[in-house]
Image (cartoon, rainbow, N blue to C red):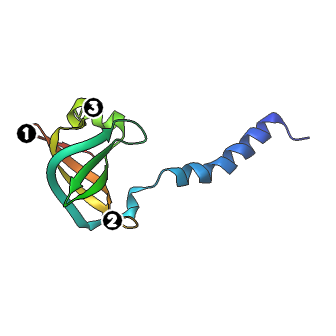
Amino acid sequence: MPSRRHLVAVAALVAMPAVALAHHGWGGFDTSKVLDHTGPIARSTYANPHGTLFMVKDGEELTIELAPTSRMQARGLAEGDVAAGKTLRVYAYQNRGNPKVYRAEWVEVAGRRVELR
């Protein structure tokens, strides 16, 4: 009969691919397709695995993925900086599979630029 340690190891190995698929890498974004947009934030989240902004451009809502909260906090980007109603400039790359999703390289809010990578 397998030991408890062996069962835990097998369970961890089986779960790894699911965890990897659950959160994508940045390789899925096309650095030749840039969004440089200034406008109000329609809504936002400030949570892990990364923050998210929702902004409207040309009548379409765009999803803009930010950095993990620990990185944003370390670089001085507080939750209130990316709250709904705030206006900011975002420089981001388009997702290869979904043209309405972007990954922010940096944001400019209240006159300061915050690098997110």
1 or 3: tag closer to the N-terminus: 3
> Is the C-beta separation of discs 2 and 3 under 8 Å?
no
Name the residue tied to disc 2. 99
**Residue at numbered disc 1:** 111
The crowd level at tag 3 (other Cα within 10 Å; few <14, some 14-19, many 20+) is some
Horizontally, residue 87 falls left or right of residue 15, namely left
Residue 62 got which mark? none
Asked whether 97 or 71 is in front, the reply is 97
Does the residue at mark 1 contact the one at mark 3 (Cβ under 8 Å)?
no
Q: Quadrant of residue 29?
A: bottom left
Q: Secondary structure at mark 3?
A: helix
Residue 22 placement, left or right of 41: right
SS category of the residue bearing label 2: loop
The residue nearer to you, when weighing 89 against 20, is: 89
Q: Residue furthest left?
A: 111
- Drawn side of residue 75 relative to residue 87, left or right: right
* Residue type marked 1: Gly
